[in-house]
Image (spheres, grey):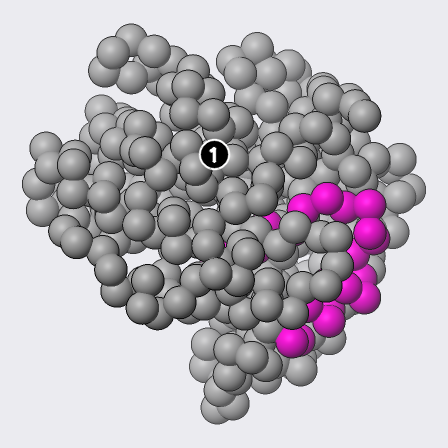
Amino acid sequence: MSDIENIAKQIVAKGKGILAADESTGTMTKRLSSVNVESTSENRLKFRETLFSADGMKNYIGGVILYDETIKQKTSSGKTIPDLIKSFGSIPGIKVDTGAKKLAGSPDEKVTEGLDGLRERLAEYYKLGARFTKWRAVYNISEKYPSELAIKSNAHALARYAALVQESKMVPIVEPEVLMDGEHNISKCYEVTTRVLKECYKELALHNVILKGTILKPNMILPGNKSKDKSSTAEIAKMTFKCLKENVPSEVPGIAFLSGGQTEIEATQNLNEINKINDTNFIMSFSYGRALQQSALKNWGKNIKDITNTQKIFNHRSKMNGLSTSAKWSMDLENQVNV
């Protein structure tokens, strides 16, 4: 088995998932402003270091996706951030796309950029300690969209990215996110996600990407956030599982869902429900940003020196999501946090 296959398996080893801490400086500034903390590079580092050195990392976090600024920072004890993450038994990763920009030919849609100079950047990130990467493509649903152009352009970019990453001896996370913004129902989300996944795997095959050395980071199948139709957790799980079972090749070792606008509890509960019916070899796990960090951030914002309670909250969220990877989560356990 190759190194990348081993790394992919390790990241989503049973009970573990991914902490997405790859917010850009702009996004992190918004998050910190929401809890009245000034967004300096020192404060951004302080919050991330608080999470990365929490006990929950050891048992429930197999990989951490970093941002360019963070992977180059040193902790208060002088360790590099990748070394801190490794000391907790987790694997450092890095976001390598440069963001979603207007798609020429369909300006209401987006295509993700960042292929120029990627080979050189990957070599640098590998030296810094990264062993996996992330690239996110976004698709919006409306009466007209996503267009065939958006689906094909993003799939092509994701595949070129994945091939370059494997050439650099790292694991690519392939993230085609169908956004939950809109009035669409759950069936529309299912139909669009199916089209998106089919095209992605067609392009990955064309680019000779070794699927055993990749991780898929998809959206769950959800109704739009402005939809009049509400769906039960059981329906969300059933539709999500069906869509992935039908469209993701069996060689892919792990599927790590994004939380995409769900609350912390919704993201955990839905993953738990999916794993109740998961009868495949796919490891169904999580790659959450806000759904792992939001409550911890709120607490930290009240007093940035209160590391103990901030870590306690993060440990609890990590544990709840860890349990949901094997359908062992429950609302009773959820309510047992003591801060």
Give the left or right position of residue 307, taking residue 293 as reference.
Answer: left
Q: Amino acid at mark 1?
A: Val
Identify the residue shown where x is 83% and y is 35%: 210
Give the left or right position of residue 71, taking residue 252 as reference.
Answer: left
Indicate the position of residue 99 as horizontal and vertical percent values.
54, 42
Q: Is residue 116 magenta?
A: no
Residue 208 in the image: above or below residue 254:
above
Seen from the viewer's position, the closer of residues 95 and 48 is 48
Answer with the quarter of the image where residue 215 lies.
top right
Which segment did they paint magenta?
238-261
Indicate the position of residue 330 as horizontal and vertical percent values.
40, 67
Identify the residue shown where x is 29% and y is 17%: 75
Identify the residue shown where x is 58% and y is 35%: 11
Density class for disc 1 (Cα within 10 Å; few <14, some 14-19, many ≥20) is many
Indicate the position of residue 208 as horizontal and vertical percent values.
89, 35
Give the left or right position of residue 180, taking residue 85 as reference.
Answer: right
Identify the residue shown where x is 45% and y is 41%: 60
Answer with the quarter of the image where residue 261 lies.
bottom left
Q: Which residue in the structure is indicated by mark 1?
A: 64
Q: Is residue 247 magenta?
A: yes
Seen from the viewer's position, the closer of residues 209 and 213 is 213
Residue 179 visible within the image:
no
Residue 323 visible within the image:
yes
Indicate the position of residue 113 as horizontal and vertical percent values.
63, 40
Q: Secondary structure beneath disc 1?
A: strand
Residue 141 in the image: above or below residue 106:
below
Residue 110 in the image: above or below residue 73:
below
Which image quarter holds the N terminus?
Answer: top right
Seen from the viewer's position, the closer of residues 250 and 277 is 277
Answer with the quarter of the image where residue 29 lies.
top left
